[in-house]
Amino acid sequence: MDNEQKNIIWSDTARNPRLFLIDARALIPMAIWALHICWMTLYVALAGVFLFSALERFNISPMCAFRIIKTKMIGAKRPVSDRVIYLRRSRN
């Protein structure tokens, strides 16, 4: 083993993939544009890259952003579908 392979740390595998300065997950809209090339999809793809880059700037992952949007749309409290299950959960 050379010296470079000895310095690899397993915790580095949890880092997000990057392409130069941009998070690689932010480039997914550009892949969609590559499948259907027209001006409208280019604008949508650039807006998606800008949105994901802004989320990364504020240290919000895309999945966390989707959860925040879902919570804002639906509400923080879940509706009770079965009262018996609700009462059983509330006793504990």
Image (cartoon, rainbow, N blue to C red):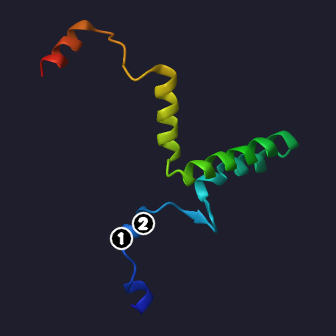
For the C terminus, the image quarter is top left
In the rendered image, which residue does mark 1 sit on? 10
Q: Position of residue 49 (x, y in %)?
A: 68, 50
Residue 63's place in the image compared with 88, above or below, is below
At 16% from the left and 15% from the top, the residue drawn is: 88
Which residue, as the protein is rendered here, is positioned at the far bottom?
2
Q: Secondary structure at mark 2?
A: helix
Q: Is residue 67 visible?
A: yes
Give the class, few, some or many, for how many residues have Cα within 10 Å of label 2's Cα (few <14, many ≥20). Answer: few
Give coordinates of residue 1: x percent, y percent: 39, 90
Report the side of 49 relative to 59 (left or right): right
Return the x and y of residue 89 as percentages of the image width and height.
19, 19
Judge from the rendering whether residue 42 lies leftward or rightward of residue 29; answer left or right.
right
- Cβ atoms at labels 1 and 2 below 8 Å apart: yes
Residue 79 in the image: x percent, y percent? 36, 13
User: Is 37 in front, or is 17?
Assistant: 17
Extreme residue in the right direction: 39
Residue 18 vs residue 21, the one in the foreground: 21
Q: Identity of the amino acid at label 1? A: Trp
Q: Which residue is mark 2?
A: 13
